[in-house]
Amino acid sequence: MTLPELLLGVMFVGLIAYALFGGADFGAGIRDLLAGGTRRGARQRDLIEHSIAPVWEANHVWLIFVLVVLWTAFSTGFAAVVTTLYVPLTLAAFGMIARGAAFAFRKSVTTLPARRFFGACFALSSLATPFFLGTVVGGVASSRVPPGIAAGDVVTSWLNPTSILGGVLAVLVCAYLAVFLCLDARRQGHDDLADQFRTRALGTAATTGLVGLIGVLVLRADAPLLFDGLVGRALPVMAASVLAGVVSIVLLVRRRYGPARITSSTAVATILIGWAVGQYPYLLLPHLTIEEAARSRSTLVR
Amino acid sequence: MTLVLAAAVAALESGWITTEVGRQPWIVYGLLRTADAVSPAPGLHLGFHAVVAIYAVLTVVTVYVLRRLAAGHDVPAPYEGRGEQEPDARKVGAREVGAP
């Protein structure tokens, strides 16, 4: 393994951590949106707030870590991605700002209409942030980000079939990761709440599987290079992801929430690893390899 | 006291403006000009307007929330403090208003 590959691996560990912690967090926001009427959803909302309190804003540390590794080690790749895809990246950042602000304000203002308003902002931005980050992945994966400063199309680089698929999958994965809430609910002795979260998680898992199947067709038509990698070198990883997803569903059906956490995390992590393996050795398909993007060795070593 | 707060903010902002305006037209002094560093991507001004709008809204909401808190309107929302679900709802979170 070369030094640039090692660094890219470290960056991917950060990306997986962000997908798992941040994803679970955004998933909680989506659950919050779907929890139901003000009174009916109140107990779910309370549990969500309690569960995400230790991690909810610290998650973005992982995203910052990923960005810092990218611009330090792979500056040319970073420059191409952030200038061509600045629109979805900005919108994702707006989602994070709105989310943090709304969550904080909702805690401070306790009258019902105000809480409803801020709660809606919180939940909607939980949808927007993963969606736009997913479109960024779709843009890179479908060869729409050429190297160079703003060399790609700033609109079609993220408004295209693969990006929409990436965005939808990201939202679904986040919604699914709220599976973590099942165990939290049961630990606190709310078996009925755990059952509600379980039903939702099963529904989301089924939808994610369906979208994944459609996604195979989308990728074959729209991102042939990535598709070749996914059915070629990355096939074992993708198979592991599907297997972990199926095992998660079985565990959820049997109410084994603890092991379901582990298999769910595995399913999500292997999707990201599959993407990386499918793209290898390219950082930006089909122009820029990992080695080319990591030109300055002195920055990598120090 | 209020005057001191305002003066602190003014000093902070003036310092920023001095450094940012003072080094123009360089973004990295003597090495890279601002005009050469800016992204050529179209539509960047839209992002600027959006940021201004978002911060304006956040400022207004912050002032509103702080004034509300100062005026002592901080009473529990109906679904938290009253109603049949109250004991359970409190137990789930066991949190205080204003906790992070």
Image: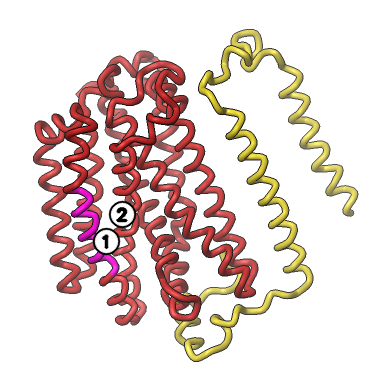
Q: Quadrant of residue B24?
A: top right
The stretch in magenta equals A200-212
Going by the image, does A252 lie left or right of B59?
left
**Residue A121 in picture, x, y percent from top left:** 54, 58
> Hey, what amino acid is under mark 2?
Leu
> Hey, what amino acid is under mark 1?
Thr
Q: Which chain is red?
A: A
Position of B47 relative to A240 (above/below):
above
The residue pinned by badge 2 equals A172
The residue pinned by badge 1 equals A204
The chain holding disc 2 is A
Q: How is the image coloured?
A: by chain
Is A208 magenta? The answer is: yes
Few, some or many C-alpha atoms within 10 Å of disc 2 (few <14, some 14-19, many ≥20)?
A: many
Position of A247 relative to A43 (above/below):
above
**Residue A16 in picture, x, y percent from top left:** 30, 44
Circles 1 and 2 in contact, beta carbons < 8 Å: yes
Q: Which chain is yellow?
A: B
The chain holding disc 1 is A
Quadrant including the C terminus of chain A: top left
Q: Nearer the viewer, residue B11 or A231?
A: A231
